[in-house]
Image: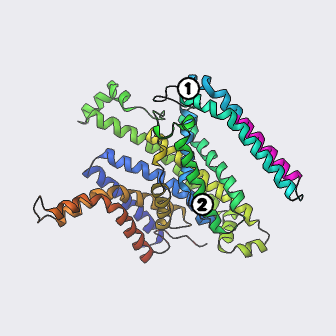
Amino acid sequence: MTINRRNVGMFALMALLITIVGVSQSWSVALAILNLCLISSIMALGVNIQWGYGGLLNVGVMGFAALGGVAGVLVSMPPVANAWAAGGIGVLIALVVGLITIVAAAWTYNKLRGTGSYQALTVGAIVVVGYFAMRWFMDPAVDAIEAVESAKTGYLGGLGLPILISWAVGGVFAAGAAWIVGKIALGLRSDYLAIATLGISEIIVAMLKNEDWLTRGVKNVNGIPRPVPYEVNLQRSEYFQKLAADWNMSIIDLSSITVKLCYAGLFAIVLLAILWLSERALRSPWGRMMRAIRDNETAAAAMGKNVTARHLQVFVLGSAVIGIAGAMLTTLDGQFTPTAYQPLRFTFLIWVMVIVGGSGNNWGSVLGGFVIWFFWIEAEPLGLWVMDVITAGMAEDNALRLHLLNSAAHMRLMMMGLILLLVLRFTPKGLIPETRR
């Protein structure tokens, strides 16, 4: 069997597993798994661009995905007129003051370069004065905004634009944050980047949880507009009612499947576009240069390559892809929930996808996204089935049997560890290893 046939066979096996879920459980569940597999694969592609191309250790995937998610709120939700009237002007003035402070501090730092303590004192004074000036405008404005029907709104809202625009904006937000982190940390040792990305991701999530005027914090933002029809509108359609009767299906099931298929089509288009661009980049002279830098930075620098600039470039590109996936996930959920951004889901699992699929191989990252997310979701029903088989000979009220059945939900973590161990043991370079050309 050739490598290409082997790869096709693994993707075909994943399609078969999703089909089995559709037949044995429901097609709605199978399509829900498919949609999240597509989004997870895009996130894995972003991490693979950073790690597989450039050898950059980003353990702050969660933060960049959260920035993509908040883009869905700021772009697509309608503006809250009363909140803007109450404190919108104050927030805008505060943001302008903050921007002026940053520009003034940067200009002063460059202008007084080489003057030692005088430079540090002057820049420090500008930052302190600017900070308190910004808070003088911001604090009363925030209090006024959050007091506007706090149970229902209590935030400024968004721009009321189509939700699909937020996917690109999410990429821009994540890329901007990556540029700031990269400018600070990429010139240092590689472990500093890991520390910086971990820290910035926690800061981002903490801000989204606490800044109610921007994202409603832990009260969440519900009712984010969709790029696809609503189920209730399809159910009212005479055409769908007739179609459900002809196919002998529940109209609720038919509308749910139709909506999920629409989402799957949109997500597949984005995944294929990013995958195509990633493959073109990997096979280009730029891709060969990035792999050379990854394998031996000293030799690449000796050949005249600007290693730090190329690292920054690939770090920003990978983060942008993660931000796009984060905006897509918020679109699929229809709500923005800051507390849902946990390192286990948005950092650990994504890294496992890249490692299992094959670091440095874009197709491997896509396969890893499908494999890991599928078993992450199906671990609980599989665990229940295994425990039920093991305890089949026990009495219904047996304490051990009840304990094992109640523990089936914890099979997820064990299954992830088992998959990772098996892959590292038998295919240490991943299911689809990097191709050396």
Task: Tell me residue 300's x, y (percent).
Answer: 74, 72
Relative horizontal placement of residue 54, taking residue 264 as reference (left or right): right
Which residue is tagged 1?
80
Q: Secondary structure at mark 2?
A: helix
Q: Residues within 10 Å of mark 1 (few under 14, many from 20)?
A: some
Q: Quadrant of the N terminus?
A: bottom left
Q: Quadrant of the C terminus?
A: bottom right
The picture quadrant where one finds residue 139 is: top right
- Tell me which numbered mark, 2 or 1, is placed earlier along the sequence: 2
Q: Is residue 33 visible?
A: yes
Residue name at image x 57 percent, y 59 percent: 198
Relative horizontal placement of residue 26, taking residue 6 as reference (left or right): left
Whether residue 305 is in magenta: the answer is no
Q: Amino acid at mark 1?
A: Val
**Which label belongs to residue 49?**
2
Task: Tell me residue 176's x, y (percent).
Answer: 67, 48
Q: Which residues are magenta?
A: 94-112
Whether residue 99 is in magenta: the answer is yes
Task: Tell me residue 141's x, y (percent).
Answer: 63, 30
